[in-house]
Image (spheres, helix red, strand yellow):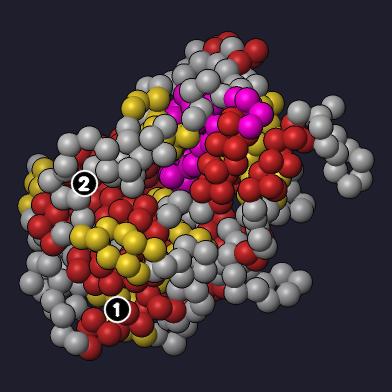
Amino acid sequence: MANQTTVSNTNAASGGSSPESGEGSKPKYPGIRLTCNGNQLVTQHVETRITEGGIYYPITPSTEGGELYQQSFAQGELNVFGQQKIAIETEGEHAAQGGATAFSVTGKRAVNFTSGQGIAYAMEQYYHAPGKGSTMVLEVGARALTKHALNVHCGHDDFYGALDTGWIMLMGKTAQQAADQAVILRKVCELSLNPGMNIQDGMLTTHSERTYYAPEADFLREFLGAPWDMIDSPTPAQNELFGPKRRRVPEMMDLKHPVLLGPVQNQEHHMNGVVSRRDNFNEPILGFLEDAYKEFGELTGRHYGLVSTYKTEDADTVYVTLGCAAENIEEAVDYLRDNEGAKVGSMHVNVIRPFPEAAVINALRGKKNIIVLERTDEGLSGDNPLARDICCALSKGVEAHRHKGTLPPIKPEERPLIFRGSYGIGSRDFRPEHVLGAYEYTQGKTHRKDGKGAD
C-alpha cells in the first residue's frame, strides 16, 4: 500500500509510507515481529507493559483482554518501568469503569476492557471522567448492541453511543494500528488530561491472527516516559492549574494534598465549567495527536495521522469508513482502477473524537462523490454518525468560503455529493463485490431493490 498517505488537520495531504510497508531507512524502533491476535497484541504486548492497574469486567469480544491482564498480574510480571500492577475483576462494567477512573486520578496508569452492552451499562461513568482529569484508556472491541436480537459480533453501535461523553476516540483499521494507537493515545491522554477510547473491530480485528510488530521496551520508555516524570505544563490552563511543571500523570486524588473533584455546582458555575473545558482542555487535543503521530512515525516507521487516505490524490469518488472494512475497500479500489480505469480512493478516519474537520476537508474537498459506509443504522436519525460529522465539516468549509472562519474554505462547487450506506452490522459478511456495488450505484449503473437510484 505504497500509495497510502496521512492528512493533517491544517495542511493538505503529506506523504507517508503505509503503516506496515517498511519503506525508507530502518527506524530506531521497528518492533518485534510476532504472531498473535488483536486482543493479545493490544493487551499482552502494550497495556500490561505500560500500566499499573487493570480494572475490568469480562464481556465478549473483549474478555480476552481482561484475562491476559489478570494472567500477567498473577505471574508477577512487572511493567517496563519496573512496577508491579494490580488486576481487579469487578461485579459489572459500571463498577469497572468507576474503578478505573478512580485509580487513574491517583496518578496511576489505568486500563479497562469492554465491548457492546458493557459500554452501554457503564455510560454514566464516562461523562464525569474528563472533568476529573482522568488519563485512563478504555480498550474497546466494537460490538453490535442488542436490539431486536442479541449479537456478540462486530458493530459500531456501542462506541457511537458514547460520542458525546467527552472522550478522545481512536479507531484502528488493523490490530497493528490498534496497538500502535494504544501507545499514541496514552501519550495524548496524559498531555491533555482527558481519557480516551482505543477501538478495534470486535471479533474481526480482536480475534484476527496475523503477524504483527510489538513495541520494544526501550521504545515504550522513550515515547511515553514514566508516570511520575515531571514535565512542562503543555497549555496555559494547565500552567495556571499546576504551575510550570507537573507530574506526567497528575495525582488529582492525593491524601497529603487533597483537592475537590466532582462537586455539586449551581447554574452559573456549572455552565462556566462546561464551556471552559472546551476552550482550555479540548481544543489542544488535535494538535497533541498530530505531534504524537509524527513522533511515533519517526521512531517506528509506521505512519498514521488524523485520517489515512489511499489513492485519493486523483480520485473523483472516495469511500470513507471506520475499521477493518477499509482493507476490503482498498482491494476494491485497486480492482476498479486496474479493470475499469475508475478514479476511486479510500479514506479511513483514525480519529473519531475530536472529529478532525480540517483534515477531512483537506482530504475530500473537490471530489465528486463521497461514499460513507457505516457499521450501524440509526433508523430514526437523519443520518448515521460518521456521515453527520462529515456533512457538518464540509458545510462549515462552505461557510468558511462565504464568511471566513478557522477551517479550510470550500467553494460550493467543490463540495462533493455524499452517498450513505450501512454494512456489516453484527459482522454480516462484507466483501469486495459489495464495495463494487456501492460504486456502481453512484454511477447510475445499478439501483436499490426498491428501484431507487443515484440518478
Q: Please state which of residues 454 and 287 is positioned toward the viewer in this rendering.
A: 454
130 left or right of 323? left
Dot label at residue 300: 2
Disc 2 or 1, which lies upstream in sequence?
Answer: 1
Q: Quadrant of the N terminus?
A: top left
Inspect the image, locate mark 2, and give the three-letter code of the amino acid beneath it.
Thr
* Percent position of residue 435, x then y: 66, 44
121 left or right of 80? right
Residue at horizontal 16%, vertical 80%?
77
Residue at horizontal 75%, vertical 35%?
440
Q: Please state which of residues 237 and 345 is positioned toward the viewer in this rendering.
A: 345
Q: Is residue 305 magenta?
A: no
* Percent position of residue 222, x then y: 11, 52
**In the displayed structure, would residue 342 be above or below residue 428?**
above
401 left or right of 231? right
Range shown magenta? 339-365
Camera sees residue 113: yes
Residue 428 image-quadrant placement: bottom right
* Percent position of residue 206, x then y: 45, 67
Camera sees residue 260: no
Residue beneath disc 1: 69
Residue at horizontal 46%, vertical 70%?
207
Q: Residues within 10 Å of mark 2 (few under 14, many from 20)?
A: many
Question: For numbered disc 2, what is the local secondary structure?
Answer: helix
* Percent position of residue 318, x then y: 59, 31
For marks 2 and 1, give the one nearer the viewer. Answer: 2
